[in-house]
Amino acid sequence: MGAMANRRGFIVTLLMLAPSTVLIAVFLIAPMLIVLGYSFAGRDAYGGIVPGFNLDSYRELFQPLYFPIFWNSVKLAFWNTVLCVLTAYPIAYFIAFRAGRFAPVLLILMLIPFWIDFLIRISAWVVLMGRNGMINSVLTATILDEPARMLGTYGAVLVGLVYAFLPSAVFPIYAALQPIDRALLEAGRDLGAGPVQNFRRVTLPLSMPGVMAACLFVFVPSMGVFAIPVLLGGGKSIIIGNLIVQLFLDFRNMPLGSAVSVVLLVFSSLGILLYMRALRRVEAARA
């Protein structure tokens, strides 16, 4: 009876996992394998795929032309991560410790932008930062004599990135702050710790897993985003995401575009591995 029950449970588990397994295999694993295969293939004169196995596309990535693009991608993703975390932590702290019964409302307000299409939200910033946009109207009415040039600049791209990925930093930090036992903070105050010392020795260490998760959730997708540099940067700030789109659609060089995609996937995987390793160290230190 026990063996039969175990077998029946195993079959039921397989049936329950089958739909998600099929979806993952069809829409995630299979496309990744196709891209990986294309990265080792050749290219004919018309942009078609020539089946084969060679490393020409990966060798081409070592040309000096691509180093600034990779460096610009890392730099943009790094500063976006720093700004998002520095902005998200006070927001998450306020929602977790000060908002009280209004915390669910504030979290829902953070989710509202996700209900609108991503391109529409970024296009709104094009209007806001345009020469005759609302931001320039306020600036010219207060401190400037003529409209400032914002679109097509590095700063505009960074503003768009922070706007797009700020919620991705708030939620993991909030998830780490919310379960913190308030008795620990009261014990710190009873032992003579001030607000700054209490934050530095109690709150911040306990919230580090959320901070690291926020860094991961912001940095990795920032490397591959392409709509924001095109719409707000005018295509001048080329990063890995833009490069992949141009190689596939404009230059019809699918092997090289696939090789860049594989490199981006490797970078993302390394980031996840570093996050898991750091998380284990933090959990070990807390234990």
Image (cartoon, grey):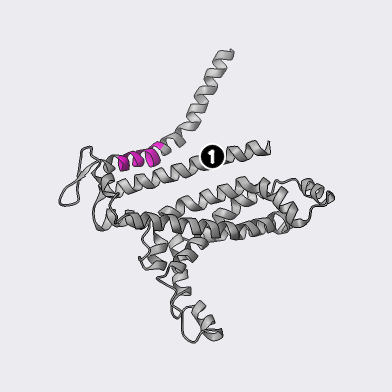
Q: Secondary structure at mark 1?
A: helix
For this orientation, the residue located farthest to the right is 190
Q: Residue at label 1?
A: 276
Question: Is residue 91 in the magenta section?
Answer: no
Q: What percent of the width, then of the height, locates residue 140? A: 51, 84
Question: Is residue 33 in the magenta section?
Answer: yes
Q: Is residue 225 visible?
A: no
For this orientation, the residue located farthest to the left is 45
77 or 225: nearer the viewer? 77
Q: Quadrant of the N terminus?
A: top right
Magenta region: which residues? 25-36
231 or 54: nearer the viewer? 54
**How crowded is the residue under tag 1: few (<14 C-alpha within 10 Å), some, or many (20+)?**
some
Q: What percent of the width, then of the height, locates residue 74? A: 43, 54
Measuring 69% from the left and 49% from the top, which residue is drawn there?
A: 178
19 or 121: nearer the viewer? 121
Horizontally, residue 256 falls left or right of residue 81, namely: left
Q: Is residue 223 visible?
A: yes
Measuring 46% from the left and 68% from the top, which residue is drawn there?
A: 155
Measuring 72% from the left and 49% from the top, which residue is drawn there?
A: 201
- Label the magenta part by its dominant secondary structure: helix
Q: What percent of the width, then of the height, locates residue 190? A: 84, 50
Give the vertical position of 49 relative to 77 (above or below).
above
Q: Quadrant of the C terminus?
A: top right
Q: Amino acid at mark 1?
A: Met
- Number of disc labels: 1
Horizontally, residue 43 falls left or right of residue 241, namely: left
Q: What percent of the width, then of the height, locates residue 75? A: 44, 57
